[in-house]
Every structure is written in structure tokens, then in C-alpha cells.
């Protein structure tokens, strides 16, 4: 039976919300395609297991860390629809980098030979692991994809590319949206522990972490101009949209009361977020955004969406529609 | 005890190429210029682009302004991330480049090519780098990971996706064909267009700006923040 494999990032001691969304999409696809849905977690076990280069082995091994935490993760993945859970143990410190967890993840891929590999598009590891996984198995890659259809489910990205059950070859998808499913009933599911020999790639040395400056963040941004920021109705709708997108609102010093002191951005400063929604004509250089939507501004080259007309009305309606999804 | 000078003497400086991609930037050349300026920190770095003639002319012009030599691979193929990575990996081997920078920000899906080039060249990878500084045998990088900034040291062969802006330049002149760019045909790189075509993307109509609220909501739906369990 074909395998659909979902990579699960952890957010503290539970599955990352974006990974659970990927699991929901994987559930829909696996049910339609008659595939087994595996959820794979990489966990650190500092105890050396065998020589690097030795094949990974599936074994009954005591899981490292707090037993209650692992049980809570298992329950969450079972409720999310997983048929089976794989825990890949690595000696490397866990960080969202291929150099850190790539060897362990490769062990999972070798073990399962999945037809479809699914990541949450907003999960911390997705940008590092997703494309590398696709390149390693020669798969097609879908960014910000969704599962569509009811009986014959397919996966589609926003450029219109798709993968169906009848297609040959493997695919890797970074899921941006998934249906909300009721909790899955099966609680007693298998957990396979995979001890993967090997350490982190010494060529990449993580020396530390610190909060990023606003201009360096890759998460979604909403950039508001001074005039829009002075309109209470627009501000209210902007905040609703920011809440639904999980976006940071940014603007000039004149808009500090709206965006907050930490989100004031210098005039003309370049940003390169995954998504930028502009309200009015903010004085921020948004050309580096992966996706750009303008509210109250003209469309044009490289603009994915543009809403003209009264800003407050359009923005309120847009927020309402998105809140309902 | 190993001193800083010993380490510098023991290790060769990396041979660097910067992959500018297969098409001109979507909205601004600022990020292209930033990648080139970053590459110029490494002595002897070479800019590499592939695709149609007008794009190669632009890439050659911006590389020359940054003081870099350039290589172009003329082709009218339209490939996916792995197809373009095959071309860049072949150019890297041809140039004996061991460190490859990739301009990630000029086009949205380019970050996927970082991983693919790394896979094909058996190199380490690092995406979303927002600052980069060479220092003896190591490269110091800052990587954006959501709202945090990771400080990373890179040792040895690596493919590094950079999103570092250059100065704004919205009024640049359309470049003329450049003799300074060295053209490499696919055959010289040992690549067969018929084989590469297995990674071809289907041709699609140019994506027009969405103007209906429902269509924009559909576009934004894949960015809705995931809800956490209570």
C-alpha cells in the first residue's frame, strides 16, 4: 500500500499547528488514494546508537525524554488522523535545518519510500526540509498547496499545478490550508521507533539565535500607510485581517499608535516576507515579498491581487470571508 | 594549539559562484544587486544565469556593475526547481565552484533551488540568509527563521540562499547584449535538453492580478495562520 508521509515539527511539547494542518491534508489524500498515513517526528536521543553509515533500524527502543510528553504527542497525532507514527531518533541537536535533522529524516524516507511527503507550509522545518526532500527523491514540489475534491482528492498549488492518485512519481507538498476534520477515533495506533545513526552535518554550525529585526522576518506582513492608519474603521479591519493571517502590521512612525512601537519601519526599507498585504500606499519597499496583495492600490506587474474601491469596506469584507474559512 | 593564522593557511578560500536564476526578478532588481554585492565579498566570484537572451543581458550588466565575471547558459527551456538546479550544478562543476550563493528573493519559488543544487553537488545548504561575511575558511551567516535570527558558521562546500537587498534602482536602463558574459551551451556542460525536458513545467497563461474579492480571499486562504489547539 502506498505511503503518505507527514513531517511533524514540534512546538514545545506538542505538534506544531502547521504540521497538524499538514496531517489533516494528508488524511484526506490518504483516504482518497487508499494509502497509509504516517506521521513522523524527529526526536533527540544523545546516546550513540551505532556507527555512522550503518543502516537505520526499526527497533523497540525506549523513547528519550518525558514519557507523558511523548504520549501527548502520540495522542495528538492519533486524533489528527495518523494511521501510524514514526519516531526517528537522532544524536544531533534538533533545529529546523537540514544539516541538523537531514540524516534522521533520510532514515524515515528510506524506511517508508513514500509516494507523497507533506509538510506544513508554516512549520519551522518546511523551507529547509521540503525542497531537499523533493530533490533527494526526484519529486515534484508544490508550495502553498491544498487538497481539493471530495471522493477523488487531488493536491493543487496556486499556480494550477496538481497531483492526482493516478499520477506516476512522487510529490512533496507544503500545505497552506486544509479542511477542518473531526478528531479521528483511532487512539491505539502503532508507534515505530527508528534509530538513525549519524550526527549533524559539521559544515553548518548553529552558533546561536536571537529575535529577528522586523525587516528580516519571513512571516506575513501587513503594511499600512499613514492615511489609512488614521481611519478607525480601516484600522479595525486591518487588525482582523492581521489576526486571521497571523501577520505583523507595520507602518511609519506616524502610524506608531496603530502598529506599535516595535513595528515602525523606516521609509523605503526593503522587506521580503512570504506574504505582504499593503493598505493604501505605504512607504515600504515590498518588492521582495513572495506574494503581494494591494488593498486600495493599483495592480500591476508582480501583484498577485488588488482591490480598488473604498478600503474600509473591502478590507472588512475580506477579513470576514477569511475568518469563515 | 591551532591559531587563527594556521587555520587560514590550512584552508583554501572557497571558490564562489552566485546563481541568479532563470528569469529576471519579478518586481525589482534590488535583491539581484544585493546577491551580487554579497558575492563580490568573495574574491573571484562568478555570476551565473540561465534562460532567454534578454535576461542574460540584464544579468551580465548587473554582474559587471558589481565587478563580477559572468557566465550565461542560453536556453528557452522552462524547467522546475530540479531542472534549473541541474544546470547550475553543472556550471558549478565547470567552474570548480564549491560555495554557491543563490538569489532567493527575486522570484518567489527560487528558494527551492537552493536545496536542489545542494543535493546535486553534495553540499551543505542554508536558506533564508539575510547577512553574510566571509572570514578565513568559514563564512558567518545570519539566517531568518520566522521571527528569530539564527547565527550560523559555514565550513566547506555549501549552497546558501541569500535575501539581502542592494540599493534601490528602479530606473535602470535596459541593457544591451554584453560581450563580457561567457556563454556556455548545455552541450558544453554535458547536459542534453531532451533529458532536461523531463523536468519541464507545463506552459501556463501569465497570471493576471486577481481583482475580485473572492479570488483574492482564495489566494490568501493558503496563508491563514493555523489555529492552535486550545
Image (cartoon, rainbow, N blue to C red):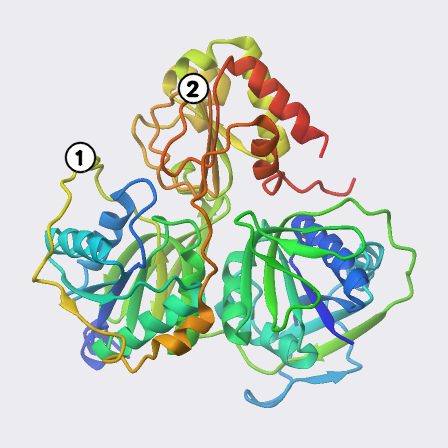
Quadrant in which the C terminus of chain B is drawn: top right
Helix, strand or loop for disc 1: loop
For mark 2, name the chain: A
Depth check, front residue: B37 or A154:
A154
Badge 2 density bin: few <14, some 14–19, many ≥20, Cα 10 Å: many
Asked if residue B169 can be seen in this view, the reply is: yes
Query: In the rendered structure, the residue with mark 1 lies on which chain?
Result: B
Q: Residue at x 47, y 51 (%)?
A: B204
In the rendered picture of this protein, how many numbered marks are placed on residues?
A: 2
Residue pointed to by mark 2: A280
- Above or below B220: residue B41: below
Q: Is residue B157 visible?
A: no
In the displayed structure image, the side of residue A163 where residue A150 appears, left or right:
right
Image mark for residue A243? none
Q: CA distance from mark 1 to mark 2?
A: 23 Å
Please rate how many residues cluster around mark 1, counting C-alpha atoms within 10 Å: few if below 14, some from 14 to 19, many from 20.
few
The image shows residue A165 at horizontal and vertical percentages of 71, 65
A216 and B190: which one is in front? B190
Q: Quadrant of residue B36?
A: bottom left
- Point out residue A175 in the picture as x, y percentages from the top left corner: 63, 52
> Are both tags, 1 and 2, on one chain?
no
Q: Position of residue B21 (x, y in %)?
A: 31, 59
Which label number is shown at residue B171? 1
Amino acid at each position: 500500500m502506498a505511503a503518505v508521509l507527514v513531517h511533524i515539527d514540534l512546538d514545545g511539547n506538542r505538534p506544531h499547528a502547521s504540521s497538524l494542518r499538514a496531517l489533516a491534508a494528508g488524511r484526506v489524500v490518504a483516504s482518497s488514494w487508499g494509502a497509509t498515513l504516517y506521521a513522523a517526528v524527529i526526536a533527540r536521543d544523545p546516546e550513540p546508537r551505532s556507527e555512522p553509515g550503518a543502516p537505520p533500524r526499526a527497533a523497540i527502543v525506549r523513547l528519550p525524554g518525558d514519557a507523558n510528553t511523548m504520549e501527548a504527542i502520540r495522542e495528538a497525532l492519533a486524533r489528527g488522523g495518523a494511521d501510524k507514527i514514526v519516531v526517528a531518533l537522532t544524536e544531533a541537536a534538533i533545529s529546523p535545518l537540514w544539516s541538523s535533522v537531514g540524516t534522521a529524516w533520510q532514515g524515515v524516507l528510506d524506511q517508508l519510500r513514500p509516494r507523497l511527503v507533506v509538510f506544513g507550509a508554516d512549520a519551522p522545518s518546511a523551507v529547509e526540509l521540503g525542497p531537499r526532500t523533493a530533490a533527494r527523491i526526484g519529486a515534484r514540489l508544490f508550495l502553498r498547496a491544498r487538497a481539493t475534491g471530495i471522493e477523488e482528492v487531488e493536491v493543487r498549488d496556486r499556480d494550477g499545478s496538481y497531483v492526482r492518485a493516478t499520477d506516476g512519481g512522487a510529490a512533496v507538498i507544503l500545505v497552506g490550508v486544509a479542511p477542518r476534520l473531526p478528531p479521528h477515533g483511532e487512539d491505539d495506533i502503532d508507534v515505530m521507533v527508528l534509530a538513525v545513526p549519524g550526527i549533524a552535518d559539521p559544515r553548518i554550525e548553529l552558533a546561536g539565535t536571537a529575535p529577528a529585526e522586523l525587516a528580516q522576518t519571513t512571516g506575513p506582513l501587513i503594511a499600512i500607510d499613514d492615511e489609512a492608519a488614521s481611519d478607525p474603521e480601516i484600522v479595525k479591519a486591518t487588525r482582523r485581517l492581521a489576526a486571521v493571517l497571523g501577520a505583523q502590521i507595520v507602518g511609519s512612525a506616524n502610524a506608531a499608535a496603530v502598529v506599535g512601537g516595535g513595528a515602525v519601519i523606516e521609509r523605503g526599507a526593503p522587506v521580503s516576507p512570504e506574504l505582504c498585504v499593503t493598505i493604501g500606499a505605504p512607504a515600504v519597499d515590498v518588492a521582495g515579498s513572495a506574494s503581494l496583495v494591494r488593498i486600495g492600490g493599483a495592480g500591476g506587474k508582480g501583484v498577485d491581487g488588488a482591490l480598488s474601491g473604498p478600503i474600509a469596506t473591502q478590507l472588512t469584507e475580506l477579513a470576514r470571508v477569511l475568518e469563515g474559512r | 594549539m591551532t591559531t587563527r593564522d594556521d587555520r587560514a593557511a590550512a584552508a583554501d578560500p572557497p571558490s564562489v559562484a552566485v546563481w541568479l536564476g532563470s528569469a529576471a526578478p519579478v518586481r525589482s532588481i534590488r535583491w539581484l544587486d544585493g546577491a551580487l554585492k554579497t558575492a563580490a565579498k568573495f574574491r573571484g566570484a562568478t555570476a551565473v544565469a540561465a534562460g532567454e537572451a534578454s535576461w542574460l543581458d540584464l544579468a551580465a550588466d548587473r554582474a559587471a556593475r558589481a565587478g563580477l565575471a559572468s557566465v550565461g547558459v542560453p536556453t528557452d527551456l522552462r524547467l522546475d526547481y530540479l531542472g534549473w538546479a541541474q544546470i547550475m550544478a553543472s556550471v558549478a562543476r565547470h567552474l570548480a565552484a564549491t560555495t554557491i550563493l543563490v538569489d532567493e528573493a527575486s522570484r518567489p519559488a527560487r528558494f527551492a533551488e537552493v536545496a536542489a543544487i545542494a543535493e546535486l553537488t553534495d553540499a551543505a545548504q542554508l536558506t533564508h540568509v539575510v547577512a553574510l561575511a566571509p572570514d578565513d575558511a568559514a563564512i558567518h551567516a545570519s539566517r531568518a527563521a520566522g521571527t528569530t535570527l539564527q547565527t550560523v558558521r559555514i565550513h566547506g562546500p555549501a549552497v546558501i540562499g541569500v535575501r539581502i537587498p542592494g540599493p534601490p534602482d528602479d530606473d535602470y536602463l535596459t541593457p544591451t547584449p554584453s560581450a563580457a558574459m561567457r556563454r556556455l551551451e548545455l552541450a558544453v556542460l554535458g547536459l542534453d535538453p531532451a533529458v532536461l525536458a523531463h523536468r519541464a513545467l507545463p506552459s501556463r497563461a501569465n497570471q493576471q492580478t486577481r481583482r475580485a474579492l473572492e479570488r483574492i480571499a482564495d489566494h490568501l486562504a493558503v496563508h491563514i495562520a493555523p489555529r492552535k489547539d486550545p
